[in-house]
Structure formats: structure tokens, C-alpha cells
Amino acid sequence: GGRALSNPDKVVRAVGRIDAQVSRGAALLANLNRFAHSLDRTQEQTDLNQEVQQTAFLCQRLARQGRHQVQVQPGDQALPVGLKPLWLQMALFAAVECCLDQLPEAGTVTIRTGRQGERPSLEFIAEAEQEAVAPFATGTASWGQLVQMLDRLGASIEASDTERRLLIVLPLAEVA
């Protein structure tokens, strides 16, 4: 059939969609591959910015179910952390889940990496229609999981209703 070629715009659009899906598939594979390798690593120096980017990417599908998005504002320098990468990623996922649970439809979770004094930190801000939302509810299952994970990591958490943010402060990386 020469019918498809009679509408070149349709063909171009279809090829564009296929290209986008291939790119998405490649990015997903790369991130899942990196995630799978993090299961092999026990305790080593890793860059917090990189771990956050990867976890945010893997959370996008969960976020899209509520028409939300997860975005990262990385710090301008590497933030070395000496934690089990899998535990760190599980804690990050739990924190994102806490935020998503509190958002009405079509909200945004922003993760900012930085420092509190010497220690690497993560700030989670949940917003819907430019309005900050308290990103946690202390009685929920996702909150319980987060607290447990952070405890295991030796991290501390500050939940501020007034500032409407969740601040996680990680332990200092031990310099070998």
C-alpha cells in the first residue's frame, strides 16, 4: 500500500513518536541497569546528586499515575556519601512517596541536594498549583517506612509544617 506515503505528515509524526519511545526505553534501561549494579555495591562513596537523579527518574512512572512530576535541583558540586546505595535509594523512594501521598492531582515534588553544615542534605518540597503542600503525614505507612530507612542509614529528618518541607540530613562520608 502506497496509502501511508500519501500523508507524509502522519509518517513523520509516527516516526517521531517511535523515536521518543525508543529514547525513553533506552533511558529506562540505563537507569535500571545502574540500579541493578547498586545492589552489588555494599558501602562505598557515591555521589548524592547522581543517586537522586536516578531515583527521581525511576519514580516518574509512580508520579505520573497521579499526574505528578518529580524534579531535581542538584547542588553545584559533587556530594560524596558513604552509604549503602540500595538503602539510600529506598529512603529516597520512601520520601518521594510521602510527598506524592499528600499531593492533590497534578503536583510537583522537587528534591534539592545541599549541605547542612558539613553533612549532605536533601530537601523535599511538594507543590500543587504553585502552592506548597505539607509533604508528609506522620501517621502514614510511607512515613513509617521513611523513618525506619533513615534510622538504618544514621540520617536525621526534620519535618516542618510551617516551612512545608521535609529535610533529610545524611551522615558524613568517612574519608578512607
Image (spheres, rainbow, N blue to C red):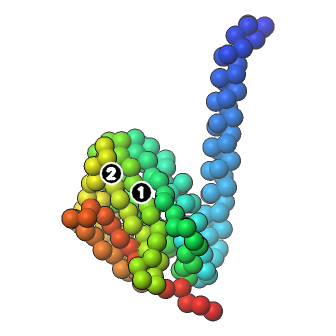
The residue sitting at 57% across, 78% down in the picture is 80
- The residue lying furthest to the front in this view is 76
Q: Considering only vertical position in the picture, is 102 above or below 66? A: below
The residue sitting at 66% across, 60% down in the picture is 33
Left of 134 or right of it: where is 77? right
Q: Quadrant of residue 96?
A: bottom left
Mark yes or no: residue 46 visible: yes
Q: Looking at the picture, how far across and down is residue 20, in whole percent? A: 64, 36
Mark yes or no: residue 91 visible: no
Left of 155 or right of it: where is 86? right
Q: Looking at the picture, how far across and down is residue 47, in whole percent? A: 59, 73
- In what quadrant of the picture does the N terminus appear? top right
Secondary-structure class at tag 1: strand
The residue sitting at 61% across, 63% down in the picture is 35
Q: Quadrant of residue 4?
A: top right
Q: Quadrant of residue 125?
A: bottom left
Q: For mark 2, what is the residue?
A: 127
Could you classify mark 2 by the number of other residues whose Cα lies within 10 Å: few (under 14), some (14-19), or many (20 or more)? Answer: many
The amino acid beneath tag 2 is Glu
The amino acid beneath tag 1 is Thr
- The CA span between labels 1 and 2 is 8 Å
Q: Looking at the picture, how far across and down is residue 51, in whole percent? A: 56, 67
Proximity of marks 1 and 2: CB atoms separated by less than 8 Å: yes
| Mark count | 2
Labelled disc at residue 58: none
Labelled disc at residue 110: 1
The residue sitting at 41% across, 57% down in the picture is 110
Q: 157 and 3: which one is in front? A: 157
Left of 27 or right of it: where is 81? left
- In what quadrant of the picture does the C terminus appear? bottom right
